[in-house]
Image (cartoon, coloured by chain):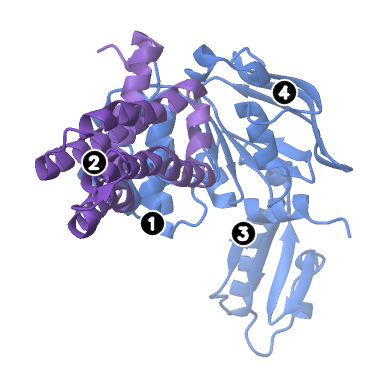
Amino acid sequence: MEAVVSVRGLRKRYGAVDAVAGIDLEIDRGEIFAFLGPNGAGKTTTVEILEGFRTRTAGEVSVLGMDPAHGDGPWRDRVGAVLQESNAEPGLTVRESLQLYSGYYRAPRDIDETIALVGLGEKADTLAPQLSGGQRRRLDVALALIGDPELIFLDEPTTGFDPSARRTAWHVIEGLRELGKTVFLTTHYMDEAEELADRIAVIADGRIVAEGTPGTLGGRNSMASTIRFTLPQGTGADDLPAELRALVAGVDGRVTLMTETPLAHVGSLAEWARGRGIDLPDLDVRRPTLEDVYLELTADPA
Amino acid sequence: MTTAAARGPVALVVHQARFDLRGFLRNRQARFFTLALPLLFMVIFNGVFGDNVVGPGSTKASAYYVPGIAALGVIAASFVNLVISITAQREGGILKRRRVTPVPAGVLVGGRTLTAIGVSLVVVITCDWACCANALEPEVSIARPMMALTT
């Protein structure tokens, strides 16, 4: 696989603070890569260095085979970006905005097709500033796509969206995968990264604390699952068979068991309950969510 | 279809100016201060002082006002409008978004310049025409080169 983005020991210092304290990244062609982290972790600083907006203090960066600090016109032809905050073009309709931007590129995409791709077909002749927040963001995506770039940076593309607008935006981003684009997505939403990304890196305090696929990030695949249930009146956690009693992590109205082999233990729990003639109607078995992993990874050591 | 970028920097400046101008014309405030206000001044000043005589050459005031008011329109078109809209574009992240694209900064400056020149010309010609239609003063011809220079 060819690396589209390659970063070695990237460092950015502001005064006495390292906003980015030495990170390594490798992103392959056609991949959707999510860069996850809390506010102020260094996400946007990193992205802006990759986009060529900021200079770096140290480290090696190559984006599409070029150092973004010296990115020229032909290089910008191949890169698209949705910035964290950008207003619509004043006084221009959706179609006109795209006409304006398509003129900047040597080989742009078809305008109407791009409008349809982001689902703004019915709004093509609406003035851009009159669009709703979600629609405007989709216009941003369209503007980033119009040059038919190989690599697209999406900096928190769904922040401030209502749930249905987020779903629509996700569809658009999924669409980018089908077009074979490489996507660098920053977000602080776990579900977004889980839904969209092929690979995730978590950044906290300027350092990458974990990297992996949504399924394996931070050892998630081998982390203990929780089994929770409420015992009926007159039955206590002490009545459980010894094998299960050893797993009890908490009794707080509901009994919580932590186990790395959930199926086996649910089996013996069911056997025990059937033997006593009781039911456990609110039984639930839960794998650690990406959010649990994330919170653990980004938690302050204090 | 070849794009403006592929046809070279001049084509790109013209492309940019087309859209800048469209944005300008859809901005009610800019329209009022640049296009309507100078005309309004012309009508008011000429209505009140139009028949007065100014200076040693006994120029009619209606002609005398033309270059000054035209200059007002030119200033609105090229400075006031520019300052307000560029600031808004910078604060709104629009300039930054354009920086991600291959468009050179010079093209954006060129587009604005071309738009300002175009709008200024319209203002000056309108003022000139309004004056001629009204006052029929031969002295206006003296004012014309001056106005052209201001532009």
User: Mark 3: which amino acid?
Assistant: Arg
Q: Position of residue B133 (x, y in %)?
A: 10, 41
**Residue sitting farthest toward the bottom:** A234
Pointer 4 residue:
A7
- Considering the numbered disc 3 on the image, is that residue within a helix, a strand or a loop? strand
User: Mark 4: which amino acid?
Assistant: Val
Report the quarter where the C terminus of chain B lies: top left
Mark-to-mark CA distance, 3 and 1: 26 Å
For marks 4 and 2, give the one nearer the viewer: 2
Image disc number at residue A124: 2
Q: For this view, does A191 lie left or right of residue A178?
A: right
Does residue A125 lie above or below A292 as drawn?
above
Same chain under badges 1 and 4? The reply is: yes
Do labels 3 and 2 touch, CB within 8 Å?
no
User: Mark 2: which amino acid?
Assistant: Ala
Q: Earlier in the sequence, mark 3 or mark 4?
A: 4
Image disc number at residue A164: 1
Label the blue chain with its letter. A
Does residue A122 lie above or below A26 as drawn?
below
Label the purple chain with its letter. B
Same chain under badges 4 and 2? The reply is: yes
**Residue sitting farthest toward the front:** B56
Q: Earlier in the sequence, mark 4 or mark 2?
A: 4
